[in-house]
Amino acid sequence: MRWWPRSIRWQMLFGLALLEALSVCLFALLLIHLQRQEISQRAAHRLSHQADSLTEQIQEALLEQRSDLIGLSAHMMGGAPSVARARLTDPAGRTLFDSRSESAPLSSEELAQIPRIHGRDARVFSFASAEWESVKPIYKGADLYGYGWVLSDRAWDTEELSGTIRGTALFGLIWVIASSALVLLLARGISHPLAVLHRGTRALVSLPESSGNFPLPVTAQNEFGDLIAAFNRMVAAIEEQRAGLHDTLSLLDSMLANAPVGFAFFDRYSRFVRVNQVFADLTGIPLSRHLGRTPSELLPTDVSPQFEAALQSVFTDEEPVSDLEFHGAASNSPWTWLVSAYPVRTTPGQVRWAGVIIRDVSERVRSEEALRKTEKLAATGRLAASIAHEINNPLEGLTNLLFLLRKFCNLDAPALDYVAMAEHETRRIAEIAQKTLRFYRQSTLPVRARVVELVDSILDLYKARMHTLNIQVERRIDPHTTLFCYEGEIRQVLANLIGNAVDATAAGGRLLVRARRSRHWRDSQTVGVRLTIADTGTGMTPEVRSRIFEAFFTTKEATGTGLGLWVSQEIIQKHRGLVHVRSRAASGPQASGTVFQLFVPDDENLGARGRASGQ
Ligand code: ADP
Ligand code: MG
């Protein structure tokens, strides 16, 4: 309906005006109809009376033979205020007398009434457009003299009717105007708060950041006022939620930006939707160039198929995959990535993205490799040193024997030459042995080291593995404790012991590392550091326990070297320390575990004495 107004105010106004106009019209119609009926009844009554009186006067004039009175009667009747014309006709309808100056013959409709007149009664009829007229026969004795006609004055009758119509119209107009004013007032009470709400909603949608428009003014003290107040409360709540959301987003953003691991999110088609700087650093491609691309476009070709397969498995199985190791090499230095991927659901039951966490563990892998190498080197060193040490005694015997051979066995010249050659070679062997020993003993110099740093450097190394196994680490170390020692070697010992503990501990186990100043168990004069490494792992049977310090003894088959504890013991002995082991391999509900306790004396003369004593 194009003509129907859009605003409530005009709708109410228009609707009301329409309704009122309709009802006033109906009322007026009814009134006019009733009045018309009444008017026509009255007119009929009046006309029949007027016809009676006209004919009576004329009949009297006829009886008295006063023809002058006949015309006068008709003329007087014609002059009456409700009469338009009075006429006298003969029985055939020819006009004998007319109250109007220009007389006119009867119309055909009037003539048609003559046969319908019954006896001496007056007949009232209407003809043409609402003309009313009465006709009555005039008798002169028993003879029909003619007819008297009285035509009603229409204006006389309709005057009253038009008065009624005017009154009704005036009343209707006043009524419509008054009620429109009231409606306008009421509509303002509705449309104003609605307009306020409308403006508020638009402001909320179009300018979500501006809070200057709120709270909206509560302009009405009715339900609309309550509505605006409720709207204000809702806006405040939205504002609060928005702030919360904003906080959460900033938190997430800062987490993404500052987390020391690479983060990336992918859609179903393996396209990057979000990525952080660490990830971009790993791929070596600017952050902005990731979005919308796939791993095969950005990652090294040796890992991208594996990577995409992991993503697709997250989408199809809806299960996380964790700690996949990806290896590759960039400009000749090998790298290792630890990749975990997990489904991100925005609605329950539908995986929208796959989140990926990448950690560059190349450094750790390299350190582990280095550790294994030093363990092997240390073992080889010790092996060489013990061989050198062991051959020293027989070598001395050999030198003595050669001396005796030369002195007391009268040898001939060629034999003496051979003895000299043997002495020469023996000296060379002794020299090699000495050099080997010296190299092994003096490869590093002792320094004062902070114990907490020593321990932490090793715990860092195993952090990832312990995290994967969910091993709880308890670390009780006084941060000020220092120790004068061969730092690298003590680190080697710690690495062996902690490594063994992690090897033995199942998922969910615990590891305790404790270090504190202490005195020697047997000699209370000697101060040093006591280190405890305890685990809740498998423990050892007494048979295993008795053999752990033997070289090449291992229970780890392929992965073990059996050299760790052998080297460790040697290092502790070199520091004049002690190793103590307690272990229980429990089957059943009893707790099992191993406790290694070390005492390392804090001796400033460590290197000097070692060198002085020639060891
Ligand atoms: P490897 O670790 O290469 O086997 P080690 O000399 O370090 O060599 O250890 C020798 C053996 O001692 C191990 O194979 C293991 O059986 C046992 N062992 C050492 N530490 C522990 C421990 N914390 N818990 C249980 N067994 C241990
Ligand atoms: Mg070991």
Image (cartoon, grey):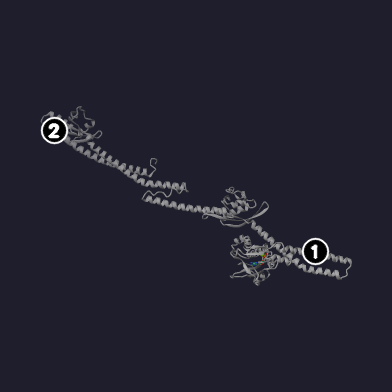
Left or right: where 187 falls relative to 559? left
- Does label 1 or label 2 sit earlier along the sequence? 2
Estimate the x, y position of residue 291 in percent, counting from the top left. Answer: 57, 48
Determine if residue 352 is in view: no
Mark 1 → mark 2, Cα distance in angstroms: 187 Å
Q: Is mark 2 within 8 Å of ligand 1?
A: no
- Residue holding disc 1: 428
Q: Nearer the viewer, residue 355 or 412?
A: 412
Which residue type carries mark 1? Arg
Estimate the x, y position of residue 189 in percent, counting from the top left. Answer: 36, 47
Report crowding for label 2: few under 14, some 14 to 19, many 20 or more residues within 10 A (C-alpha): some
Is residue 326 shown above or below 530? above
Q: Which quarter of the rendered image does ligand 1 occupy? A: bottom right
Tell me, for residue 57, which label it has, or none.
Answer: 2
Q: Quadrant of residue 461?
A: bottom right
Q: Nearer the viewer, residue 96 or 2?
A: 2
